[in-house]
């Protein structure tokens, strides 16, 4: 297995508050890595380190290395825009733009430019197909994204992220606002997507991590407690804290 | 004792509300009754005649429209850009606070002071003369705080999720602002702009020395012409001239038209705001 993303001795602060402590994690290519842990353990912060979305918040500080294909993404020479094109994200708050379904998916393509009409059209269609939304929306591409159900909206957000042809997809608790049926659809979709994309998903839902992940990380209070293949983590955790979390002793 | 106090308090509240409503309707009815006597199509579409004692107020209506639109052309871009800076770009909180205090202070400056400033800067220093341009710029500064506040409010109300989604796709701050933030904020910004137009249309003091003239034979040809305007026309009819028995009714007619204009503009803003709230789905 090739490592797509990795951190080396990663420390992260919001102001004086250290939220990531010496995190070393390797996210393998074309597989699903779940990062689980209780609220406030730093899992979302870690995910937002990978596309530098934490840059938007003032007063943060980071030491250590974050590598994408072996290149430090916090190096001064890194172009954040092209980094984020390579590392897409799907959010917890299902957040389509107040635009049409078509324009939502086309957004990233328009941002990066260089597509003519036909190209735009075909890429939007292909993205919607990849997100298994095409059959449901093909007759209403020019209706508002808000006319869709919550689960459809989240798949639209996935299509929007796929459209710019990223290499990595980050999912930040993508199902926490969705019903079980929609959740199952998203999870199935992730299984499909991992053939082409490297996927990292943050979740506080242990069952979800067990269902979808090939590799699983457990975080607690800013530390990476344990990381390994999913079946090992869920059947034979090495760390006592992981075991206690999985058996519901805390969380 | 406690009951008496409560009753007195309630009485005070009721009387206050009553006075507010009575004042409002008294003004409306007073102006309407006096104004309607002279109001007809000719009054709206004819220029003043016979030394202000006959004819209509057409040039003043047009002038007020010019000034209001001119001021918004100037204040809207400036105000929106300022609001974008304050909400999306400014990094230092203390700096933002200083600017906001400045904006509030600007809103508190008496309007005649704006008039003097406009005279000194736009009329004299920039040599625009007493003109539509000078008056529009002066009114523009006057309504700038309204535009900035409304825009800032509208932009801040755009969910953070839209910004994050845009940035996460690799958009720059400018792309995010223009494509993800401004479109949903637009109705709110336009509401602010309309309120600004209403305010600019009704002001007298700022155009007193910068734009307004009592009488003009023809409509203005360029932005460097002086111009008639409704508020100043009313003021002039009541203070100048020698035939008040003819002039005063015209002044009331003009006041009624101005009132309609400003209330109509405000009403548009209110309707827009209601529609916008209904259409909003996030």
Image (spheres, coloured by chain):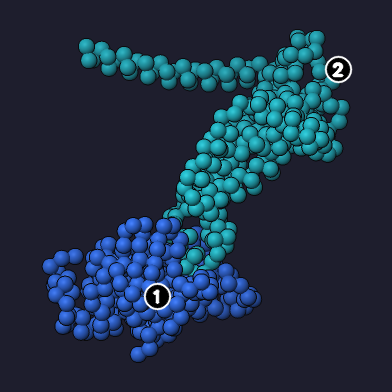
Chain colours: A blue, B cyan
**Marker disc for residue A65:** 1
Q: Quadrant of the C terminus of chain B?
A: bottom left
Q: What chain letter is assigned to the residue under label 2?
A: B
Number of the front mark, 2 or 1: 1
Query: Which residue is found at the position 61% from the left and 44% from the top?
Result: B79
Instruction: Determine the secondary structure under disc 2.
Output: loop
Position of A152 with respect to B102 (left or right) is: left
**Marker disc for residue B85:** none
Query: Which residue is found at the position 53% from the left and 35% from the top?
Result: B104
Front-lying residue, B139 or A6: A6
Instruction: Determine the secondary structure under disc 1.
Output: strand
Query: Which residue is found at the position 34% from the left and 68% from the top?
Result: A11
Query: Which residue is found at the position 37% from the left and 85% from the top?
Result: A3
Q: What chain letter is assigned to the residue under label 1?
A: A
Location of residue B174 with respect to B153 vertically, above or below: below
Q: Quadrant of the N terminus of chain B?
A: top left
**Horizontal and vertical percent position of residue B280:** 47, 52
Residue bearing the label numbered 2? B50
Q: Based on the displayed image, in which of its 4 quarters is residue A153 positioned?
A: bottom left
How many C-alpha atoms fall within 10 Å of the one at disc 1: few (<14), some, or many (≥20)? many
Front-lying residue, A215 or B103: B103
Circles 2, 1 touching at the beta carbon (< 8 Å): no
Position of B112 with respect to B278 (left or right) is: right
């Amino acid at each position: 297995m090739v490592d797509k993303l990795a951190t080396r001795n990663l420390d992260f602060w919001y102001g004086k508050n250290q939220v990531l402590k010496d995190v070393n994690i390797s996210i393998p290519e074309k597989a699903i890595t779940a990062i689980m842990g209780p609220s406030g353990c730093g899992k979302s912060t870690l995910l937002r380190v990978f596309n530098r979305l934490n840059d938007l918040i003032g007063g943060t500080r980071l030491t250590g290395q974050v590598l994408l294909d072996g290149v430090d993404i916090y190096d001064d020479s890194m172009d954040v825009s092209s980094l984020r094109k390579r590392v897409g994200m799907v959010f917890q708050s299902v957040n389509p733009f107040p635009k049409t379904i078509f324009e939502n998916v086309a957004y990233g393509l328009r941002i990066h430019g260089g597509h003519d009409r036909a190209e735009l059209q075909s890429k939007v269609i292909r993205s919607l197909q990849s997100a298994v939304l095409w059959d449901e929306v093909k007759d209403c591409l020019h209706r508002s994204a808000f006319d869709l159900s919550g689960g459809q909206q989240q798949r639209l957000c996935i299509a929007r992220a796929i459209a710019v042809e990223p290499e990595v997809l980050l999912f930040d608790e993508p199902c926490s606002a969705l019903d079980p049926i929609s959740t199952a659809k998203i999870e199935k979709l992730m299984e499909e997507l991992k053939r082409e994309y490297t996927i990292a998903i943050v979740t506080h839902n242990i069952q979800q991590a067990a269902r979808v992940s090939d590799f699983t990380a457990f975080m607690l209070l800013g530390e990476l407690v344990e990381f390994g293949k999913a079946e090992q983590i869920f059947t034979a955790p090495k760390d006592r804290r992981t075991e206690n979390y999985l058996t519901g002793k805390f969380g | 004792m406690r009951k008496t106090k409560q009753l007195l308090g309630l009485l005070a509240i009721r009387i206050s509300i009553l006075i507010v409503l009575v004042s409002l309707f008294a003004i409306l009815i007073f102006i309407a009754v006096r104004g309607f006597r002279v109001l007809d199509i000719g009054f709206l579409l004819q220029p003043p005649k016979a030394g202000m004692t006959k004819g209509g107020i057409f040039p003043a209506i047009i002038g007020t429209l010019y000034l209001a639109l001119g001021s918004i052309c100037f204040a809207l871009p400036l105000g929106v850009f300022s609001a974008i800076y304050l909400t999306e770009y400014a990094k230092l909180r203390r700096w933002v606070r200083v600017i906001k205090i400045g904006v509030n202070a600007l809103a508190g400056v008496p309007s005649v002071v704006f008039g003097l400033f406009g005279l000194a800067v736009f009329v004299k220093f920039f040599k625009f003369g007493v003109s539509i341009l000078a008056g529009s710029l002066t009114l523009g500064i006057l309504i700038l705080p309204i535009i900035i506040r409304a825009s800032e409010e509208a932009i801040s109300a755009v969910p953070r999720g839209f910004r994050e989604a845009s940035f996460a796709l690799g958009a720059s701050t400018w792309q995010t602002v223009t494509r993800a933030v401004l479109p949903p904020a637009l109705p709110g910004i336009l509401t602010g702009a309309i309120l600004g137009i209403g305010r600019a249309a009704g002001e007298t003091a700022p155009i007193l020395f910068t734009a307004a003239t009592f009488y003009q034979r023809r409509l203005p040809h360029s932005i460097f012409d002086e111009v008639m305007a409704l508020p100043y026309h009313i003021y002039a009819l009541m203070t100048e001239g020698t035939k008040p028995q003819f002039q005063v009714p015209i002044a009331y007619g003009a006041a009624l038209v101005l009132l309609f204009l400003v209330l109509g503009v405000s009403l548009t803003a209110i309707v827009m705001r209601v529609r916008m709230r209904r259409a909003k789905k996030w």
